[in-house]
Amino acid sequence: MYSNTSELAEDKLLLLYLLDKIKLPISNNKVTEIILENNFINYFTLQQYLTELANANFINYIEQEGKHRIIVSNKGLKVLSLFRNRISEVKIKAIDCYLKKQMESIKKEIAISADYTIEGNNYIVNLKAVENNSILIDLKLNVASNKQAKDLCAKWKKNSSKLYNELFKVLINN
């Protein structure tokens, strides 16, 4: 599968580099999206590497807001600092460029959540915004239909900043 073990090591170091550069707990789905969009590693190999990195305690899985997230561990950072030079500059530049373009989107995806649950005949919509591990808003609304619940979630994900500011103004000024 690999021409040599240095390719395997480079790919794992690249994952540590990515997690270090993001500096936020991130979902497996988002890591997968970044790696696949840049054609660095195929899906199945990526999942195997993540498991191996976790088993070696180079990355940790944490639960945040009821969701599983990945962070690079101190042990992983130490290994990265020792062997970063084994990652090709082309791959480092590709990750840096991707993150420069996509970081705001990644942060927003991590910091904004919107979901709903069904309780009896009602739908409870939970809209949340987090910044620097501080909850800005955690709002629960009771709505009558699945469509309303889905629409509220979609609007929150699309315009959370604007909606938060408008709600804040209404509550402060009145």
Image (cartoon, rainbow, N blue to C red):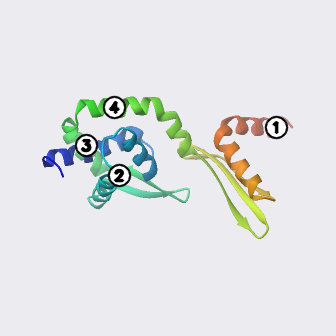
Task: Decide: is 95 above or below 63.
Answer: above
| Residue at left offset 43%, top offset 29% | 100
| Residue at left offset 45%, top offset 44% | 24
Q: What residue type is disc 4 on?
A: Ala
Disc number lying in front (4 or 1): 4
Which image quarter: residue 60?
Answer: bottom left
Q: What's the CA distance linking mark 3 and mark 4?
A: 17 Å
Q: Residues within 10 Å of mark 2 (few under 14, many from 20)?
A: some
Disc number lying in front (3 or 2): 2
Residue on which the image places disc 3: 80
Residue 5 at x, y = what percent?
14, 49
Q: What's the CA distance linking mark 4 and mark 1?
A: 44 Å
Q: What residue type is disc 1 on?
A: Val
> Along the polypeptide, which appears first: circle 1 or circle 2?
2
- Using residue 71 as the reference point, say whether residue 129 is left or right of it: right
Residue on which the image places disc 2: 43
Q: What's the CA distance linking mark 1 and mark 2?
A: 47 Å
Q: What's the CA distance linking mark 1 and mark 3?
A: 48 Å
Q: Residues within 10 Å of mark 4 (few under 14, many from 20)?
A: few
Q: Residue furthest left?
A: 4
- Pick the residue in front: 172 or 98: 98
Residue 122 at x, y = what percent?
78, 64
> Which mark identifies residue 94?
4
- Using residue 174 as the reference point, say whether residue 34 is left or right of it: left
Residue on which the image places disc 1: 170
> Along the polypeptide, which appears first: circle 4 or circle 1?
4
Q: What residue type is disc 2 on?
A: Tyr
Q: Describe the element under mark 4 as helix, strand or loop.
A: helix
Q: What's the CA distance linking mark 3 and mark 2?
A: 22 Å
Q: What residue type is disc 3 on?
A: Leu
Q: Describe the element under mark 3 as helix, strand or loop.
A: helix
Residue 153 at x, y = what percent?
68, 49
